[in-house]
Each structure stands twice: as structure tokens, then as C-alpha cells.
Image: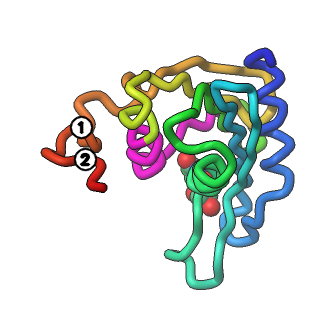
Amino acid sequence: MTDEQLMGLARKAAARAYAPYSDFQVGCAIESVDGELVTGANMENVCYRLGICAEQSALSAAQHRFGLDRIARIAVAGGTGEVVCTPCGGCRQAILEAAQLSGRDIPVLCGSGDGATLERHGISDLIPHGFGPANLDDPRPA
Ligand code: THU
């Protein structure tokens, strides 16, 4: 699957977001090292602080489908205009968790809402000097 195709899945997922309060729909598509695919979208709540980002939604699906440590690539798209949607700080932290579990940098493709722009980042660029599982003495207790 090309980067553009993975981004296409993220854009399709955004269309199924539940975002009546911000009216800002975000979609996320995640591919595993074996080519398995999961998607997610933001899901808001009338109790605003309970809203869930698209990335968190897709990461949860990825853990259930194939495991966080097997994530190969992530695509995120949101909004409707020309501004590129990059993951929020919390989502960067969540992606860092997966990256450190696998011991690999994870490419994060970020798309504008209008579909015109696709930026390629690595999670190490998006959250440099991050605090992750590797910082703990015993990151994966039995
Ligand atoms: N949002 C995401 O889903 N992912 C991000 O990385 C940025 C923000 C959502 C949260 C909220 O539902 C809406 O976009 C506006 O902030």
C-alpha cells in the first residue's frame, strides 16, 4: 500500500468521526508490519473532556488486531482546509509508546483536510526527547 493509499483510508475514516462539538473530523489509519490495517476517528462527548482522538481510537484497534509493537506506519488526516493535521501532544506520546515497544521509529503521514498535502514525519521528529517505556527501569513487567 502506498502512502497515498494509507492516507486515503485515514480520510475515509475521518468521514465517520463523531465530532458534533468541534465540527473537526479526524481520521487515522494504521498499517502493521504484515500489512494489516485498522482505522479510527475522533469521538466526542457532550462532557467535552471525555472526547477521544482519532489516533487513540486507531491505536486501540491496532493493539487488539495485531499489537502495538507491530505498527509499521500511521496516517492522520483532519479538517477540511489546507492546514495539515498533525497529531496532538497526547497522541504523539501514545505513538511513542508503540515506537519504543517495537524499537523502531514510526513514520507518521499527516494530511490536510482538502487532501492536497501529505507530509511525512517520524514520531522521533514529532516528539523529540520524549519520555517512553524505555525510560522505566522495568518497562514491561511480567
Ligand atoms: N483531534 C484528533 O482526533 N487528533 C488530533 O491529533 C488532534 C485533535 C480531535 C480532537 C477533537 O475531537 C477535535 O479533533 C478538535 O480538537
User: In the image, is residue 85 part of the stretch drawn in magenta?
Assistant: yes
The answer to whether the residue labelled 1 contacts the one labelled 2, judged by CB atoms less than 8 Å apart, is yes
Residue farthest to the front, as pictured: 142
State the residue in front, 135 or 69. Answer: 69
Q: Position of residue 125 (x, y in %)?
A: 38, 23
Left or right relative to 16: residue 106: left
Q: Is residue 30 above or below residue 90?
A: above
Q: Where is residue 124, by image quadrant?
A: top left
- Residue pictured at 78% horizontal, 15% vertical: 2
Q: Which residues are magenta?
A: 83-97
* Kind of residue at badge 1: Ala
Q: Is residue 94 above or below residue 32?
A: below
* Kind of residue at badge 2: Pro
Examine the residues drawn in magenta and state their main secondary structure. helix
* Quarter of the figure with the C terminus: bottom left
Q: Which residue is mark 1?
A: 134
- Residue pictured at 62% horizontal, 32% vertical: 74
> Local crowd at mark 2 within 10 Å, few (<14), some, or many (≥20)?
few
Residue farthest to the left, as pictured: 137
* Quarter of the figure with the N terminus: top right
State the residue in front, 112 or 8. Answer: 8
Q: Which residue is mark 2?
A: 139
